[in-house]
Amino acid sequence: MKRELKLSEDIQFLVQTFYSKVLKDDVIGYIFNDVMDIDWDKHFPIMYSFWESVLLGKNTYKGNPMIKHIDLNMLEPLKEHHFDRWLLLWEQTLLENFEGAKAEEALVRAKGMKQLMLMKINEYNKHIKA
């Protein structure tokens, strides 16, 4: 049964379900499993806070996701197909489990993040090659 995204518990379920797909994925899973050294006990609460801030207005997230992705890009070049897959898995997770305005907003926000991340990473790549 689908539910609405309205509580912290919903965000936690969304994030955990999404990353369970990501970690098994044949396109981007290796980035999370092999390239990055992720302490999931620390990473999950950061992701909960990020998405609670974005979708629920909690404003508890303290960080800069852009810097983290630029740093990651130096370890493993992030390409558009990586972000496309990330977005596809995010959308699948939303469609399988959630409904309503916040679920739609979660997809719109993720699409915007994909575009912004790609633009900033491409700008960074051009700058370091110049």
Image: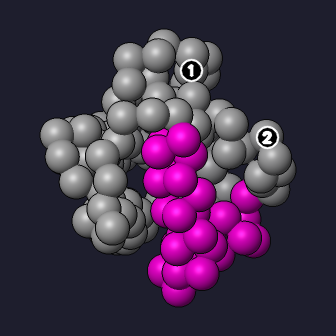
Nearer the observer, 90 or 67: 90
In space, the residues marked 2 and 1 are separated at their CA atoms by 13 Å
Quarter of the rendering occupied by the C terminus: top left
**Residue at disc 1, secondary structure:** loop
Determine the residue positioned at 72% across, 70% down.
33
| Residue 107: x %, y % from top left | 24, 49
Q: Which residues are the magenta region?
A: 9-36
| Residue 90: x %, y % from top left | 37, 61
Vertical order, 40 against 11 (above or below): below
Number of other residues with Cα within 10 Å of mark 1, as a class: few under 14, some 14 to 19, many 20 or more: some
The kind of residue tagged 2 is Lys
The residue to which callout 2 is attached is 42
The residue to which callout 1 is attached is 61
| Residue 60: x %, y % from top left | 57, 16
The kind of residue tagged 1 is Tyr
Colour pattern of the rendering: one colour
Determine the residue positioned at 47% across, 16% down.
58
Queried whether the magenta region covers residue 14, the answer comes back as: yes
Determine the residue positioned at 49% across, 62% down.
18
Number of other residues with Cα within 10 Å of mark 2, as a class: few under 14, some 14 to 19, many 20 or more: few
The reply, left or right, for residue 47 in relation to residue 114 is right
